[in-house]
Image (cartoon, rainbow, N blue to C red):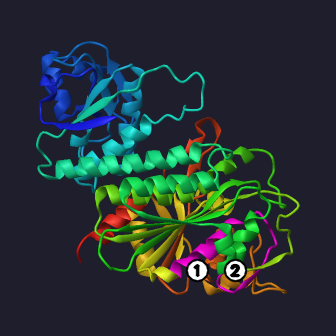
Amino acid sequence: MEYALTQEAPDQLATECLIVAIHENRGLSEAATALDRLLGGEIAAIVQRGDIEGKPGQTLPLLRAVGRAERVLLVGMGVAGACKPAQYKEAVTRAAQAASELHVKTMASFLPMIEVKDRSPAWALEQAVVATEDALYRFDRLKTRANARPLPQSCQFGTAGALGSDANEALSAGRAIARAITLAKDLANLPGNMCTPSYLAEQAQALGARGGLEVNVIEEAEMQTLGMGALLAVARGTHEAAKLIVLQYRGNGSAPPLALVGKGVTFDSGGISLKPPANMDEMKFDMCGAATVLAVIQAAAEMKLPLNLVGIIPTTENLPGGSAIKPGDIVTSLSGQTIEILNTDAEGRLILCDALTYAERFKPAAVIDIATLTGACVIALGGQAGGLLGNDETLTRELEQAGQTAADRVWPLPLWEEYQKQLDSNFADMANIGGREAGTITAACFLSRFADKYPWAHLDIAGIAYKGGKEKGATGRPIPLLVEFLRRRAKPA
């Protein structure tokens, strides 16, 4: 999709589909009012009849020419001046979907001119790009009969000069975030027989070549030499070689980097502690943390953010087999700490703990790990917010605020010392699970034991990284949150 800005008035703009807002209480936006004058009050009459009430996300097409537009799409945006960020994103998404159903190639939207509560016009424009791209996303590359319905090819956003010089910057940022989300979705939606650890390593190397990044792929032999016993233990049951992928983006000289660690289990059967068959296919999404790291670094490089980043991706499959780890086995991590494996389906924390220890060598300013880690987080927070825990209040507060701004929210959970005792083991330094109670918290407690050398935060994205059922597919979250966090860190103090 190509995106551009226009300052033409809506009644003068040539396009196949012109998108304008309608407010609740039968109010017309400025753009809708301009078109209504051309139509002699027809839009006002439609609204008065109640054909569209203006509720956020409602759509109504007018299949007739208006001015130089071939058709008009009316979109509900809620009460004027009170549209919330999530409502705005939902309305833009619904508008793009409705426009695509009209089989148009070009569209022009004046939705970014709507006032969004507690957000700037630049934010509205940026999110319009992200939401539109998200709405039009398809993953049909593996179908022999792909969807024949054409998608819109270009979209202009009306700004009427309201943004000034910020408009182009907002448009560029929106493009970068949208492309990052598409990359993450494409990787996560691939099946496990295609998106293997080796494939992820190849994609990282391709990203490095495109973005001028330093990429190092550590193989199992080197992991063995280093002492990554926890990561290698998970990989024992699969024929696919595990990888530790390390990317470096340098945008700020010798400043300490921020490190992003992404869980990359490309398929998780649970190992010997086998998962139930129902919905096991969704375990191809257990590498969404890895996809997020690749995507965020791509966005940072594209936006040329003035900071340094390290991406660390431990990646493997988790399968049963004659060589697979068993409940009761004890392994030694890169940190030297020993771990009793009580459940082989708690494998994500095992590969992450070695990656967190490996991160120490970069002397990071902070480390954030991103992982589809616990079903308990899905039960606690559903698909609305990710879980947020960490050992540094300033860092966790920054992430929470970035999520609020990006409308990609996370919610803090406690990491109190009292929870640590649930990981006690009779035979090793710790167990890899802490029982049924507080599963998300005890998983973070486990990780915290390998992240005590730097400020650290953990994002449990099990509930937000993908959807199941009829809408099955990756969401691209929490990329908007992390990009917003990096942009804030990149600003001069």
Q: Nearer the viewer, residue 342 or 204?
A: 204
Residue 147 in percent (x, y) is at 52, 23
Residue under the point 66% across and 69% down:
351
**Which residue lies under the disc numbered 2?**
333
Which residue is outermost to the right?
322
Q: Is residue 101 above or below residue 479?
A: above
Q: Nearer the viewer, residue 398 or 45?
A: 398
Task: Say whether disc 2 or disc 1 marks the residue closer to the N-terminus.
Answer: 2
Q: Is residue 26 visible?
A: no
In this rendering, position of residue 322 left or right of residue 252: right
Residue 3 in percent (x, y) is at 27, 37
* Amino acid type of the residue that numbered disc 1 sits on in the rendered structure: Thr
Q: Is residue 85 visible?
A: yes
Say how many tags the image has: 2
Residue under the point 60% across and 80% down:
448
Instruction: Identify the image quadrant of residue 429.
Output: bottom right
Residue 168 in percent (x, y) is at 19, 48
Instruction: Identify the image quadrant of residue 427.
Output: bottom right
Residue 6 in percent (x, y) is at 16, 35
Q: Are marks 2 and 1 in contact (CB under 8 Å)?
A: yes
Q: Is 172 part of what is drawn in magenta? A: no
* Amino acid type of the residue that numbered disc 2 sits on in the rendered structure: Ser
Which residue is outermost to the top?
64
Q: Is residue 297 above or below residue 30?
A: below
Q: Which mark is residue 357?
A: 1
Q: Is 358 part of what is drawn in magenta? A: yes
In this rendering, position of residue 26 left or right of residue 413: left
Q: Is residue 29 above or below residue 185?
A: above
Pointer 2 local density, CA inside 10 Å: few below 14, some 14–19, many at least 20: many
For label 2, the SS is loop
Q: Which residues are magenta?
A: 334-360
